[in-house]
Image: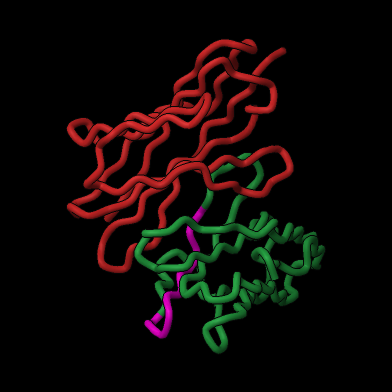
Chain colours: A green, B red
Amino acid sequence: GAGVSQSPSNKVTEKGKDVELRCDPISGHTALYWYRQSLGQGLEFLIYFQGNSAPDKSGLPSDRFSAERTGGSVSTLTIQRTQQEDSAVYLCASSLGGQGRTEAFFGQGTRLTVV
Amino acid sequence: AQKVTQAQTEISVVEKEDVTLDCVYETRDTTYYLFWYKQPPSGELVFLIRRNSFDEQNEISGRYSWNFQKSTSSFNFTITASQVVDSAVYFCALSSGGYQKVTFGTGTKLQVIP
């Protein structure tokens, strides 16, 4: 596609359920990022994939959060046993190079609401 | 470690006023990249500019200008003759270090009042 695509755009889930958020980056982009943005807050870094290197998971807030990137393309962010504090907009971005040399293109995000 | 500080959480200006958004960064690397992004009310972040650490030349693009000063570790963004459409949250970001993930500041919400 022309841009970064995220699905679903909105997700309402019950506390304790698992959720999967999907990101389709721009074709050919080697770097992929996940960020979380709580209401009125800044972007919180979660995880970063660059090519075949081991991902930088330093931003994942707990072991309930995990992400994978299959075939260097599509990525899935999984949140297990969701809690109300997980409610936020989850943003995915991709860039052509992983060394900050090119800008990141963002998807429109998945708004997660845990009730 | 890398860090970006945007001390201004919210700014309100009257249309046609000039406004400067501050950004201070921290990194121990000599090679790094700085960015500004705009997040309008629709939510999708839009890239505005990228600057590498070896290029301290200031840049102007229409009503937008950026002042990069390594001596003060700042990368400030000025909007001249602001317009209502400039109302958005603006994020400054930094990429440095071997892995070079992008770290964002907390953003500055700009409201331009007609």
Question: Which image quadrant is residue A69 in?
Answer: bottom right
Q: With respect to residue A100, does B3 lie above or below?
A: above
Q: Position of residue B106 (x, y in %)?
A: 48, 41
Residue A64 location (% of width, % of height): 57, 74
Q: Is residue B103 left or right of residue A115?
A: left
**Quadrant where the C terminus of chain A is found in the figure:** bottom right
Q: Quadrant of the N terminus of chain A?
A: bottom right
Residue at the spot 59% in from the left edge and 26% down from the top edge: B110
Magenta-drawn stretch contains B84: no
Q: Outermost residue toward the bottom?
A: A71
Q: Position of residue A101 (x, y in %)?
A: 37, 59
Residue A47, image x and y in percent? 48, 68
- The reply to whether residue B43 is in sight is yes
Q: How many marks?
A: 0
**Residue nearest the observer in this picture, A92 or B7:** A92
Q: Which residues are magenta?
A: A44-54
Magenta-span inclusion, residue A53: yes
Front-lying residue, A29 or B9: A29
Of helix, strand and loop, which mostly describes the magenta segment? Answer: strand
Q: Residue at x 69, y 46 (%)?
A: B43
- Dividing the picture into quarters, in which one does residue B102 lie? bottom left
Q: Residue at x 43, y 80 (%)?
A: A51
**Residue A61 is at least partly visible in this image:** no
Q: Is residue B44 above or below residue A110?
A: above
Q: Is residue B51 above or below residue B15?
A: below
Q: Name the one closer to the observer, A43 or B69.
A: B69
